[in-house]
Image (cartoon, rainbow, N blue to C red):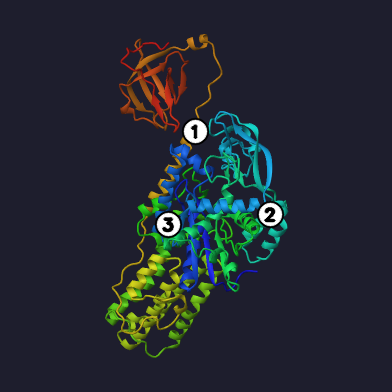
C-alpha cells in the first residue's frame, strides 16, 4: 500500500538523453508535472529532494555524435548545457540536475553491478548478435536499419519503426544494414550478463500488487508485461561508449544504459550533497532510510513518460530488490504522449516546439507555456498541443479571467483606498459565502496535486480566479463607492485576500506569475497552510501599482509559429525524397532518333483560360515555331524571353487549347517540384544540335 505520511520525499524526473534539445512533449509528459508536485510539497513544508539529470550514454548519443561530426563527449557537453539552461529558464526547480558521465555515477553504477555479480544474480549467456565486419563492431538495435515488416518503411530502426510506431527486433527487419558502414551485418557470438526477470517475476508481481492506486495507464502496461511473462534482459552491451563492466576480461563491453541510467538518480543525489557540502554524507536517508531510521519513511516517486514505464516499474525495482538495501518506487505517475498540430512529435522530423527556441521567441511567457501544457496534460491518454489553443487559453483564460481579477483588485484598491489594504467591516451574506469558498480551495487543490491530478488542480485554481471575478461583479464596488465607501473597504479587503491565496495556490503551476502577485501585494513567507485565510494581508499594508500579469497574444505571433512548423515539415519531406530510379535501358539508335537542338525563346504569353500553359515562340535557327509549355506556375512570360533552351524538335505536333504545339522545351525538376531550364554552358547558335 502507498506510504501516506512520509517524513521526506525523493522525487525524480526522467534522465533525458543528451542528444538533442528539450521539446514540449518532454515537458508535458514529465517535467512540468514533477515540478508542480515538488513545488506543492515544499510549500506544504515537506522535506524534498528533486533529482534529475542527463543520460549521457547509450546508442542515441553515439548516433548524434556521428551525425554532427563530434565526439560523444562533445555532444553530451553541448546538450547538457542547453537543456540545463532551458529548464532553469522555465522555472523547473531541481535540487540537482546532474550527469551520468560524472565519476560519482560511474562509481555508483559499477558498485551496484559488482554487488549483484558477486551475489550470483546475473546469468551469463552467449548469444548471436548482428556484427558489422567493416566497422568491426557489434551493432546495438539503433545501429541497424532495414525495411519494416509492418509498413515497409525502408528506414526502420532495429527496435522501432518511427513511421508506423511498431516495436521491432533486429531479426524482424528485411534487408538489414549497418548505420556505421552501410554493409549487411552478419551474426556473431558474444557473451553478456542477463538479469533473470523470469525467475524474479513473482517478487515483482507482489511488489506491483501492493500499489492498486497507480494510474490505470501505468498499471495496465505493467500487467501486460507480466501477463506475457518476463524474460531475461541483458545488463551489458558490446559498445565503446558507456560505463565499463566491472568484471575481468570484458573489454569492449559497457553497462546497459537502462541498468545504469536509473542509478543516475542515486548518484545525482550524491552529487547534490557533494556540491552543497563537499561530501555525499547523508545520501542514504533519501534511498536507504531503513538503515538509519527504524521509524523513518522516504517516499520515492518517479515522474516519466509512458515509454519508460517498464524500466521504472519493473527493471529498476528488480535491480533494487536484488541489491536489497534500497527503497522501491512508491508511485510512478507516468503520462501518455502529447501530439502537435495533429501529428506525433518527432525529433528526427523536426516536428516539435523546442523549449530553447520558445524561450527566445516568446520571452517572459514561461508561465503561459506551463499553463497550457498543464491544461492539456496527457495524464491518462494522448493529448494535443495546437498554437491556436495556446493563443485562446492565454487570451481568454490567463488574460481574461486570472489576470483580469488580480488587476481589478489592485487597481480598485489604488483608486478607492489610496493603494493600501482596507480594513474589513461587517460581513454580508455574500462576503461570508465568498470567504467560505476561499477557505475550501487550498485543500481541494492540494488533494488533486498529491494524487497527481494536475489538470484538476489547475481547473480549481482557475475556479478560484472565477470566484474572485464573480464576487467583484456581484458586489460592484465601482458603483457602491458613490453611496457607501465603508462597504467598498470590505469588498476590496476580501478581493485582496482572494488574490493573496490565489498567488499561493498558483505558485506550483505559475511560479513567475505568483512571484509578481506577491511582490505587488507585499506578501512573503507564506506556506500552503496559510492559504485560504481571511487575514493574509493586514489592513494598512501598501499595495504596489497594478501591472498586467499577461498580455494578449496577437494572430501574427501564432501564424509565425504555425508557419515555422509547416516549413519544417516541408524541409523534412524534401530531405526524405530520393532520386528517381534509372529508366530501362535503351539502345543508342533509340536516342539518336531524338533531334535535340539549342533554341531561343523570342516571345511568350499566357494562354487564356489555362493555369499552366504558356505560348512560346522559339527560334530554332531554321525557323520559328510555336510551343505550348506547362510552365506558367513556375515562370512569368516576360521573364523568359531571350533565354537559350534545349528543344526537342522532332516530337510530333499536339493540339492543346485549340492551338497546335510543335516540339517540346526540356526542363529539369528539383526535389521540391520546381522547374529549371536546362541551358548550354556558353553561347551557342540557334539550331546547334545536342549529341
Pointer 2: what residue? 224
| Residue 627 visible in the current orientation | yes
What is the distance, in whole Å, between disc 2 and disc 3 at their CAs? 34 Å
First-in-chain label (1 vs 3) = 3
Rendered residue at 63%/55% (across/down)? 319
Give the label on residue 87, or none.
Answer: 3
Q: Is mark 1 on a helix, strand or loop?
A: loop
Mark 1 vs 3: CB contact within 8 A: no
Q: Are there few (<14), some (14-19), or many (20+) residues within 10 Å of tag 2?
A: few
**Alpha-carbon span between mark 1 and mark 2:** 39 Å
**Residue 210: percent from the left, percent from the top?**
67, 66
Q: How many tags in the picture?
A: 3
Circle 3 SS class: helix
In the depicted view, which residue is nearer to us: 218 or 293? 293
What residue appears at the point 60 percent right and 74 percent down from the top-left corner?
A: 295
Q: List the residue tagged with mark 1.
A: 577
Amino acid at each position: 500500500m502507498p506510504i501516506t505520511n512520509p517524513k521526506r520525499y525523493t522525487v525524480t524526473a526522467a534522465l533525458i538523453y543528451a542528444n538533442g534539445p528539450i521539446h514540449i512533449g518532454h515537458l508535458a509528459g514529465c517535467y512540468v508535472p514533477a515540478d508542480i508536485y515538488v513545488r506543492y510539497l515544499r510549500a506544504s513544508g515537506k522535506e524534498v529532494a528533486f533529482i534529475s539529470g542527463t543520460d549521457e550514454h547509450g546508442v542515441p548519443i553515439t548516433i548524434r555524435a556521428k551525425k554532427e561530426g563530434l565526439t560523444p563527449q562533445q555532444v553530451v557537453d553541448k546538450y547538457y548545457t542547453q537543456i540545463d539552461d532551458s529548464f532553469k529558464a522555465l522555472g523547473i526547480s531541481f535540487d540537482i540536475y546532474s550527469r551520468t558521465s560524472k565519476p560519482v555515477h560511474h562509481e555508483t553504477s559499477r558498485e551496484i553491478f559488482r554487488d549483484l555479480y558477486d551475489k550470483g544474480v546475473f546469468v551469463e549467456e552467449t548469444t548471436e548478435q548482428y556484427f558489422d565486419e567493416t566497422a568491426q563492431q557489434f551493432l546495438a538495435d539503433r545501429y541497424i536499419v532495414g525495411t519494416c515488416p509492418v509498413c515497409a518503411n525502408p528506414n526502420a530502426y532495429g527496435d522501432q519503426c518511427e513511421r508506423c510506431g511498431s516495436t521491432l527486433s533486429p531479426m524482424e527487419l528485411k534487408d538489414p544494414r549497418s548505420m556505421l558502414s552501410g554493409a549487411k551485418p552478419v551474426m556473431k557470438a558474444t557473451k553478456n550478463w542477463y538479469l533473470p526477470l523470469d525467475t524474479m517475476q513473482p517478487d515483482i508481481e507482489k511488489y506491483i500488487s501492493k500499489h492498486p492506486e497507480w494510474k490505470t495507464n501505468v498499471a495496465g502496461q505493467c500487467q501486460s508485461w507480466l501477463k506475457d511473462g518476463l524474460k531475461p534482459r541483458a545488463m551489458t552491451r558490446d559498445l565503446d561508449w558507456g560505463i565499463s563492466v566491472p568484471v575481468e576480461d570484458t573489454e569492449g563491453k559497457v553497462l546497459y544504459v537502462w541498468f545504469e541510467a536509473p542509478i543516475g538518480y542515486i548518484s545525482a543525489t550524491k552529487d547534490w550533497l557533494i556540491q552543497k557540502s563537499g561530501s555525499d554524507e547523508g545520501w542514504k536517508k533519501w534511498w536507504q532510510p531503513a538503515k538509519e531510521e527504524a521509524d523513518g519513511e522516504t517516499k520515492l516517486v518517479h515522474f516519466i513518460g509512458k515509454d519508460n514505464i517498464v524500466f521504472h516499474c519493473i527493471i529498476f525495482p528488480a535491480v533494487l530488490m536484488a541489491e536489497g538495501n534500497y527503497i522501491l518506487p512508491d508511485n510512478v505517475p507516468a503520462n501518455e504522449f502529447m501530439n502537435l498540430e495533429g501529428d506525433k512529435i518527432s525529433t528526427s522530423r523536426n516536428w516539435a516546439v523546442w523549449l530553447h527556441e520558445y524561450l527566445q521567441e516568446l520571452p517572459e511567457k514561461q508561465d503561459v507555456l506551463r499553463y497550457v501544457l498543464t491544461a492539456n496534460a496527457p495524464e491518462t491518454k494522448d493529448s494535443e498541443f495546437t498554437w491556436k489553443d495556446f493563443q485562446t487559453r492565454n487570451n481568454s483564460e490567463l488574460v481574461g479571467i486570472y489576470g483580469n481579477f488580480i488587476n481589478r483588485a489592485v487597481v480598485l484598491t489604488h483608486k478607492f483606498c489610496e493603494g493600501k489594504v482596507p480594513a474589513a467591516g461587517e460581513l454580508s451574506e455574500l462576503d461570508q459565502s465568498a470567504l467560505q469558498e476561499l477557505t475550501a480551495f487550498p485543500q481541494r487543490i492540494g488533494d488533486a496535486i498529491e494524487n497527481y491530478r494536475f489538470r484538476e488542480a489547475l481547473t480549481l485554481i482557475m475556479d478560484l480566479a472565477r470566484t474572485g471575478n464573480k464576487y467583484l461583479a456581484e458586489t460592484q464596488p465601482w458603483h457602491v463607492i458613490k453611496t457607501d465607501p465603508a462597504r467598498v473597504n470590505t469588498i476590496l479587503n476580501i478581493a485582496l485576500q482572494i488574490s493573496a491565496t490565489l498567488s499561493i495556490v498558483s505558485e506550483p503551476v505559475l511560479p513567475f506569475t505568483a512571484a509578481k502577485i506577491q511582490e505587488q501585494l507585499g506578501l512573503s513567507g507564506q506556506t500552503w497552510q496559510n492559504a485560504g485565510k481571511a487575514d493574509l494581508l493586514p489592513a494598512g499594508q501598501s499595495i504596489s501599482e497594478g501591472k498586467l500579469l499577461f498580455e494578449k497574444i496577437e494572430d501574427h505571433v501564432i501564424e509565425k509559429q504555425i508557419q515555422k512548423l509547416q516549413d519544417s515539415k516541408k524541409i523534412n519531406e524534401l530531405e526524405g525524397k530520393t532520386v528517381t530510379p534509372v529508366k530501362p535501358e535503351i539502345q543508342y539508335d533509340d536516342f539518336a532518333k531524338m533531334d535535340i537542338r539549342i533554341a531561343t525563346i523570342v516571345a511568350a504569353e499566357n494562354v487564356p483560360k489555362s493555369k499552366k500553359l504558356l505560348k512560346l515562340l522559339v527560334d530554332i535557327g531554321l525557323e520559328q515555331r510555336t510551343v505550348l509549355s506547362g510552365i506558367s506556375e513556375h515562370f512569368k512570360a516576360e521573364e523568359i524571353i531571350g533565354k537559350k533552351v534545349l528543344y526537342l524538335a522532332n516530337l510530333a505536333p499536339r493540339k492543346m487549347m485549340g492551338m497546335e504545339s510543335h516540339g517540346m522545351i526540356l526542363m529539369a525538376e528539383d526535389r521540391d517540384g520546381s522547374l529549371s531550364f536546362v541551358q548550354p554552358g556558353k553561347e551557342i547558335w540557334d539550331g546547334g544540335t545536342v549529341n
